[in-house]
Image: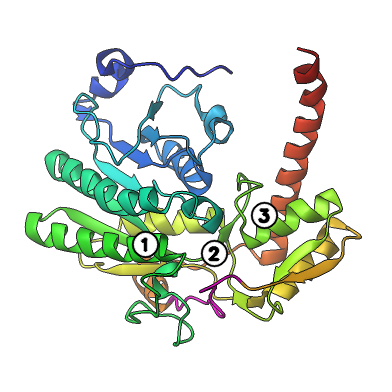
């Protein structure tokens, strides 16, 4: 399916939104970063809930392939846009804004650190100002990276973190910390409805093969028969949450009553070492790849595990997909993508 990202006229693109059905206006949800890994799954889930969905993405790290299967829906609209610039005035009023527009892997957010910081500051402000104008509920995607290399384990929402403000990860870590501050203060001054989700390590289909994250690295390397790269001794821990569980938690948080305020951790509290994760991927892929060690990057967290007591109590949420099952689904999606790429290569080369 071909999708053209040309200049748009909202009067032509959104007639179905303006129509009144039974005297009621259909709810419109904007997802910034909607062509990204988590954002695309969120768009899909919102469509299933009957929302009109507007995906805004600058496609710097998002991919058309992530949302191509949604394009046939008359309830789905794609707007190429960078939130560092003001959101166009001629778009329809948004009932909900899910702000996921920010590179989330070190490889990508470190590629242009100033741009990452601007996305967390100017971009978030543009989202908030649009929310005030429209009377929207905002769900701000924050991150477990705001805890830095934590000195408290597991990490609960009241923990203030241990972040290096001038380190190579600061554009993202401190950027997201500032974004939480900006959102909180803006909501206090204007009265907009605000939800903040602190997302812990998430994996699943549609992860980019080049994003440098633990799971995608291991799966891509194992399927290609390459050495699996473990940084440090592999004893550092992570807690991996399958993307469907994460999206379910986000939707529950967005729909939660006003007294559910302040940041909420979403992640899988099942902790595993990076070395154990590498061995599990080798087992599930049947790969004969070796595990090799490389120096640990600066400020890389040694331990990461969410305390999800608040999400359990306030949202009645907990992750349901076991790591082994989620990895099988993820490996299958990467294998399909590799096969499709291999099939299309001769056609491209002969063109």
The quarter of the picture where the N terminus appears is: top right
- Mark identifier at residue 309: none
Q: Which residue is mark 1?
A: 197
Q: Which residue is mark 2?
A: 201
Residue pictured at 43% horizontal, 36% vertical? 47
Q: Secondary structure at mark 1?
A: strand
The answer to whether the residues at label 1 and label 3 have Cβ atoms under 8 Å apart is no
x then y, percent, for residue 69 = 57, 29
- Specify which label sits upstream in the sequence, 2 or 3: 2
x then y, percent, for residue 4 = 47, 17
Q: Secondary structure at mark 2?
A: loop
The quarter of the picture where the C terminus appears is: top right
The vertical placement of 46 against 198, above or below, is above
* Residue 326 in view in this figure: no
The vertical placement of 337 against 296, above or below, is above
Question: Is 283 on the left or on the right of 351, as rendered?
Answer: right
x then y, percent, for residue 335 = 77, 43
Of the pair 236 and 266, the residue shown nearer to us = 236
The vertical placement of 227 against 72, above or below, is below
Magenta segment main secondary structure: loop
Magenta span of residues: 297-308
Of the pair 241 and 74, the residue shown nearer to us = 241
- Mark identifier at residue 216: 3
Of the pair 47 and 13, the residue shown nearer to us = 13
- Graded by Cα atoms within 10 Å as few (under 14), some (14 to 19) or many (20 or more), the crowding at tag 1 reads many
């Amino acid at each position: 399916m071909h999708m053209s990202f040309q200049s748009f006229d909202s009067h032509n693109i959104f007639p179905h939104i303006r129509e009144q059905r039974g005297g009621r206006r259909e709810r419109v949800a904007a997802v910034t970063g909607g062509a990204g890994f988590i954002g695309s799954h969120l768009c899909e889930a919102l469509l299933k809930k009957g929302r009109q969905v507007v995906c805004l993405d600058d496609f710097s790290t998002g991919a058309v392939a992530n949302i191509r299967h949604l394009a046939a829906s008359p309830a789905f609209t794609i707007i190429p846009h960078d939130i560092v610039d003001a959101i166009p005035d001629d778009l329809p009023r948004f009932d909900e804004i899910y702000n996921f527009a920010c590179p989330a892997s070190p490889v990508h957010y470190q590629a242009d650190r100033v741009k990452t910081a601007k996305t967390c500051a100017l971009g978030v402000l543009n989202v908030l100002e649009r929310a005030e104008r429209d009377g929207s509920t905002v769900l701000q995607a924050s991150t477990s990276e705001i805890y830095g290399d934590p000195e408290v384990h597991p990490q609960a929402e009241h923990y203030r973190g241990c972040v290096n403000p001038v380190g190579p990860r600061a554009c993202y870590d401190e950027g997201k910390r500032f974004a939480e501050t900006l959102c909180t203060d803006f909501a206090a001054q204007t009265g907009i409805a605000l939800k903040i989700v602190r997302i812990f390590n998430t994996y699943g289909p549609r992860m980019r093969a080049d994003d440098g994250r633990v799971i995608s690295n291991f799966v891509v390397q194992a399927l290609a028969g390459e050495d699996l790269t473990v940084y440090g001794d592999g004893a550092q821990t992570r807690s991996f949450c399958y993307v469907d569980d994460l999206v379910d938690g986000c939707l529950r948080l967005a729909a939660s009553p006003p007294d559910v305020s302040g940041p909420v951790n979403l992640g899988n509290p099942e902790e595993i070492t990076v070395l154990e994760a590498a061995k599990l991927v080798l087992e599930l892929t049947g790969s004969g790849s070796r595990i090799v060690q490389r120096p640990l990057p600066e400020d890389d967290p040694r331990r990461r595990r969410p305390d999800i007591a608040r999400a359990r109590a306030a949202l009645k949420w907990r992750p349901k997909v076991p790591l082994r099952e989620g990895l099988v689904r993820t490996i299958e999606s990467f294998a399909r993508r590799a096969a499709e790429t291999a099939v299309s290569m001769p056609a491209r080369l002969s063109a």
